[in-house]
Image (cartoon, rainbow, N blue to C red):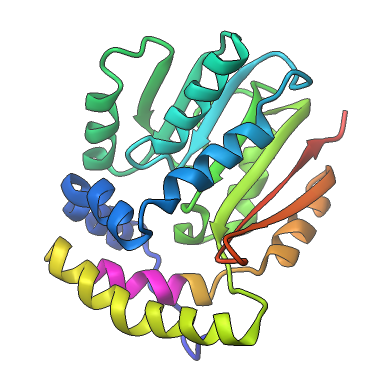
Amino acid sequence: MGSYSVDKSPERIQRMFDTIAHRYDVINHVLTLGIDFLWRKFTAQKLLHVQTIDGDVLDVCCGTGDLSFAFLTQQRKLKTERMNYGIDFSPEMLAVAQKKAKNCPSLHFSVGDVLNLPFEDDRFAVVAVAFGLRNVGNTQQGLAEMVRVCKPGGTVAVLEFSMPTLPILRYFYRFYFHTFLPKLGEWFAKNQDQAYHYLPESVLQFDRPEQLAERLTQLGIAAIQICPMTFGIVTLVYGNRNA
């Protein structure tokens, strides 16, 4: 944990992501060497399968919509038809998502806040967030809202950066995050809110996967799975809402 709290005020987060929205996809693919595509693909495959209950899919803090597109790709492989909804409170990020989805009638993106989701209770079969929950000021309230709109028997999931368990990997990971990533990210983004300095700070101060699992358990999520990827650089935590 850091010695101070990262500024996650809604105004700062919205302004920061609005500023980098037009280059967000390119920057992410470069900084992760394209592996972020595989992380989302793995997530979609884990959460959508033949046993998944009927219902629509919600991508929370969806950004430019990459997780939603991964869900759509997996649905096409399974030959299933679902409506896919994405919400984010950055209008500029959503503008990119909507442009990418112009020929995808089953994808719907709109402005929304995870702390007060604009959906009724028990609405979705799958509710997921990828690399967005750590930007929310109140983690527990955000998760509670995700659980609220999930159907009984449905799935709630969080895909997020995490710290590798092997000491040598942890050392190089921290070096990359604190030294290389901010400089390269800021060179690409050229924004005044230092988005790629914020990234390592927010990751280091966010819950560990085990802490996320405990939060979900407290909210009525059972059969929780913790799935580390790429030597623990990212982790998928998911489970089913109790009936």
Corner quadrant of residue 43: top right
Can residue 24 be seen from the camera position used here? yes
Q: Position of residue 188 (x, y in %)?
A: 15, 63
Going 50% across and 91% down the picture, which residue do you hit?
3
Can residue 191 be seen from the camera position used here? no
Left or right: where 215 falls relative to 93: right
Left or right: where 174 falls relative to 57: left
Q: Position of residue 234 (x, y in %)?
A: 56, 60
Corner quadrant of residue 119: top right
Corner quadrant of residue 193: bottom left
Q: Quadrant of the N terminus?
A: bottom right
Outermost residue toward the bottom? 3
Going 34% across and 72% down the picture, which residue do you hit?
198
Going 37% across and 83% down the picture, which residue do you hit?
178
Q: Quadrant of the C terminus?
A: top right
Answer above or below: position of 115 versus 133. Answer: above
| Magenta region | 191-202
Main structural element of the magenta stretch: helix, strand or loop?
helix
Left or right: where 216 falls relative to 203: right
Q: Position of residue 182 (x, y in %)?
A: 27, 75
Q: Check if residue 198 falls in the magenta segment.
A: yes
Q: Position of residue 226 (x, y in %)?
A: 74, 55
